[in-house]
Image: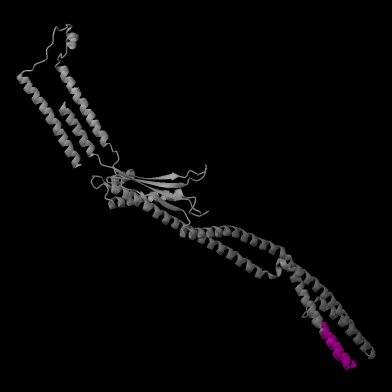
Amino acid sequence: MAALLVVCVLVALAQALALPRAFESIAVLQVQPTVLTGGVDSGDTATRLRTIEQRIMARNNVLDMIDRFNLYDDTPLSEDEKVAQFRQDVRINFVAGVTASAGAMEEVSAIQVTAQTGTAAGSANLANDIVDQIQTGNLRERDQRLSELIGTLETQDRRALEAIAAVEADLAAFRTENTDRMPENLEFLAAEQTRLEGQRTELIRSLQALERERLALEVGTSELGRQEPLAQQLRILEVDLAQARRTLAPNHPEVQRLEAQIDALREGDGQQMSVGQSRQIDLIRQQEESLQLEVAAIDRRLPMIAANVAGIPEVSETMADYTRRLAALEVPRMAIAERLSQARLDQSLVTSDYGQQMILLESATEAEYPLSSGRKRLAMLGVVLGLGLALLSGFLLEVRRPVLRTQAMVTKYLGVAPIASIPFRPTAREQVVQRTRNAASFVILIAGVVVGVILVLNR
């Protein structure tokens, strides 16, 4: 019985001591909400922290922490097994905010980092190191996202400005090409057209008056002379020339022919006119030519005005199209500019520590006692099992060699009541055997205690 008890207890103790010790340390970070109303510093905290967690638990970073803190040096684990064991021993838990409304994006109010290692100092240092990585990674991730957001918005704003500038350049070129057909010139063109038509009417009337005056002078001169048929012919030619000039170009052959005939008649009849009358007629001719030039200029300008007025609707439609294109580009550009301004404001506020902050509420400390890793439970199980086996062996020995030890047992098993009973008196040899057996049991128990103490001290 003593041997079974000692063997079971020692085996259980050895197995319990063979289990690795595990010390656990916990660090807690509080995530303070931001005062900003937009940007990357609000609304995406959970996403950003999940990204940081993934970077911390990445294989290369895990192997670096294992090397720095000398984890699993006394175990024959491979790199993959070490990484898997590390991810089991280290946990990063996010605590959701209690004020999160239903359907809203879940916000993180706290972060709990739990680390388990074989030493108390190692677990505390590892947990604090992970907390430092979270704080540093949060700042770096936030700054990086702000910089990327500002850079993207600046690029979009520049492209929007370039598109607007291109449309404005096209609009300016179109206005330059169609200056006379701008819608704002419609009133001016209408007034100019009315004015020119009135001037043309007055010029025609003046030409007719000058022509009558000139013909009167010529007719009067011919009446004083003796060659009235020649003067009458000259008058007729002058009327024909005036009509031809109103309808034909100045260099038209018909006009040139009439002028040549008039010049020929004048040369032949010039002696009949006085010098004053001839000069007066020449002056009237010059006035007629000047008025005819003005009429020709008006005749050239009026079709141009009519063409410009006719083209105003088309120009108006094109201008309206340019206006719509500019408006369509201005609306998103204003939205981009507003977001860019907000992002720059957020960046300045974050730089001034007005953004989201992580405060270390509880740093990891060295645990005084290791975790209950099953050592005590295994040792107690060994003691219980040893006692059970010892009692079972004693019962089996008793069953193999039953002994009637009391009067009741004699009566029960033999059916005869004993008349008298006397105590058992072992012989000298039996006494020696009993004492030897007791001494052996005591030695076994003492040896078990000694071996158990040695095992505990060596661990």
Give whichever of 130, 73 is nearer the camera: 130
Q: Quadrant of residue 405?
A: top left
Q: Is residue 283 visible?
A: yes
User: What residue do we see at 18% from left, 8% from top?
Assistant: 411
Name of the residue lying farthest toward the left: 428
Residue 266, percent from left and from top? 86, 89
The answer to whether 16 appears left or right of 432 in the picture is right
Queried whether the magenta region covers residue 229, the answer comes back as no
Residue 419, percent from left and from top? 14, 6
Q: Which residues are magenta?
A: 260-288
Q: Is residue 269 visible?
A: no
Residue 428, percent from left and from top? 4, 20
Of the 4 image quadrants, the one containing the C terminus is: top left
Residue 235, percent from left and from top? 89, 83
Give the colouring mode of the picture: one colour
Of the 4 image quadrants, the one containing the N terminus is: top left
User: What residue do we see at 18% from left, 36% from top?
Assistant: 452
User: What residue do we see at 56% from left, 58% from top?
Assistant: 338
The answer to whether 190 appears left or right of 170 in the picture is right
Give whichever of 423, 95 is nearer the camera: 423
Give whichever of 366, 281 is nearer the camera: 366
The answer to whether 65 appears left or right of 94 in the picture is left
Above or below — where is 380 with respect to 257?
above
User: What residue do we see at 58% from left, 59% from top?
Assistant: 334
Above or below — where is 454 with respect to 442?
below
Count of labels in the image: 0
**Main SS class of the magenta portion in the image:** helix
Queried whether the magenta region covers residue 275, the answer comes back as yes
